[in-house]
Image: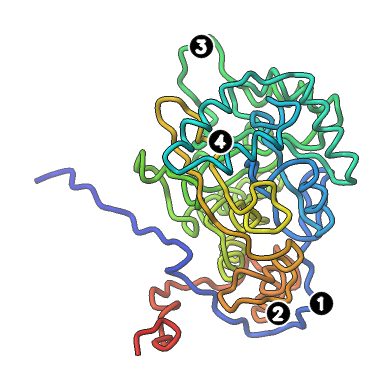
Amino acid sequence: MSNLRELRRTYGFDEVAIAPGAITVNPEMTDTSFKLGDVSIDIPVLGSAMDAVANPNFIGKMHGQGALSVMNLEGVQTRYEDPESVLLEVVEAGNDMVTTVMQKVYSAPIKEDLIGKRVEEIKSTGSKCAVSLTPAVTKAYAPIAVEAGADMIVVQSTVTTARHSSNSIKGLQFPELLEMVKVPIVVGNCVGYDVATEIMETGIHGVLVGVGPGAACTTREVTGVGIPQVTATMDCAQARDDFFQRTGKYIPIITDGGIRTGGELCKAIASGADAVMIGTPLAQSEEAPGKGFNWGMASPHPALPRGTRVNVGVKGTLKELFYGPSSVSNGTQNLIGALKVCMGMVGARSIKEMHSAEVVVAPSIKTEGKHYQLGLE
């Protein structure tokens, strides 16, 4: 029998570990900063563009912790003058009604005047303003956001490619968009070397990596599409490095989704990420507008609601999430403390040096010697 298809082995966070380095450094000497274009932040963390974790007030609080949140310009913030009451409607809906409620809520039209208003509200907090759009509406709304003061545009869909087949006469062309708006453009999401390379060649400034790993995302269950995050990050990081060697232009990659613990954050960076994007850990903060709930950006689709509202609970403050002190032993708090300790263990003074850390296949890393923790004895 000819043409047998071989499956490529891919790896997620639970299947790998970071090897300690030959040299160690004091965690206090490590630099966790991240820069993309004119936007600089103290810690390599971006907040997902989900309505449960990104209103202007929350974005200001993220800025206070040294991070950057992205706001969804197609969510409740731009559809309603009073989005807080609408968020409450989603939060308080019964489980049997929540999909219907979300479809109703997100069927209201986007009000263009609210785009500029929300951008100004974000800027008034002292934070840089990053906003997210899907490709279909980017040309219409990105210039409005930039004129109001937006500092970064994130063009985001579940799967993004530089080449897209469409029935419309002309889809979104990134070089054309770059002519329209003179701010950094981050594009996502992708998971492979070739697609990442093609996206970088369009002239954009950053790439989001990940299809379907988020806790509130059901893309993998509904469509069967996705690549585990360690392999996806490594493949796209290789594309970034090869592109840099060829052109001298460094395009940061941001691992988006599936990161809940400090260990997973460290593994994403060691796999080659320049920063990570998280959603559900932020939704668990006391400051989050979702009040202990989170839901995906694709939820409102009328025929195929691919997101689900998840009750994630309220676990602590943003400060505890990023810097501790941790009140739990499962690694879900003090993420930046964990990152700095890990960087010290592998001898990395910067995020880029962390990319040189050895990552090994380690399927028993979470269970080896942990019988008592796992309740097996």
Q: Position of residue 271 (x, y in %)?
A: 56, 62
Element type where label 3 sits in the image: loop
Q: Quadrant of residue 343?
A: bottom right
State how many labels appear.
Answer: 4
| Front position in the image: 124 or 208 | 124
The C terminus: image quadrant: bottom left
Q: Which three-letter amino acid code belongs to the residue tagged 4?
A: Glu
Q: Which mark is residue 344?
A: 2
Element type where label 2 sits in the image: helix
Q: Earlier in the sequence, mark 4 or mark 2?
A: 4
- Per the image, the residue denoted by label 1 is 29
Q: Mark 4: few, some, or many residues within 10 Å (few <14, many ≥20)? A: some
Q: Are marks 2 and 1 in contact (CB under 8 Å)?
A: yes
Q: Which three-letter amino acid code belongs to the residue tagged 2?
A: Gly
Q: Mark 2: few, some, or many residues within 10 Å (few <14, many ≥20)? A: many
- Per the image, the residue denoted by label 3 is 168
Measured in 3D between alpha carbons, the distance from the residue under mark 4 to the one under mark 2, in whole angstroms, is 35 Å
Measured in 3D between alpha carbons, the distance from the residue under mark 1 to the one under mark 4, in whole angstroms, is 37 Å
Q: Which mark is residue 198?
A: 4
Q: Of circles 1 and 4, which is in front?
A: 1
Q: Which three-letter amino acid code belongs to the residue tagged 3?
A: Ser
Q: Are marks 1 and 3 in contact (CB under 8 Å)?
A: no
Q: Of circles 4 and 3, which is in front?
A: 3
Q: Residue furthest top?
A: 169
**317 versus 346 height, above or below:** above
Measured in 3D between alpha carbons, the distance from the residue under mark 2 to the one under mark 3, in whole angstroms, is 52 Å
**Coloring applied to the structure:** rainbow
Measured in 3D between alpha carbons, the distance from the residue under mark 1 to the one under mark 3, in whole angstroms, is 53 Å
Q: Earlier in the sequence, mark 4 or mark 3?
A: 3
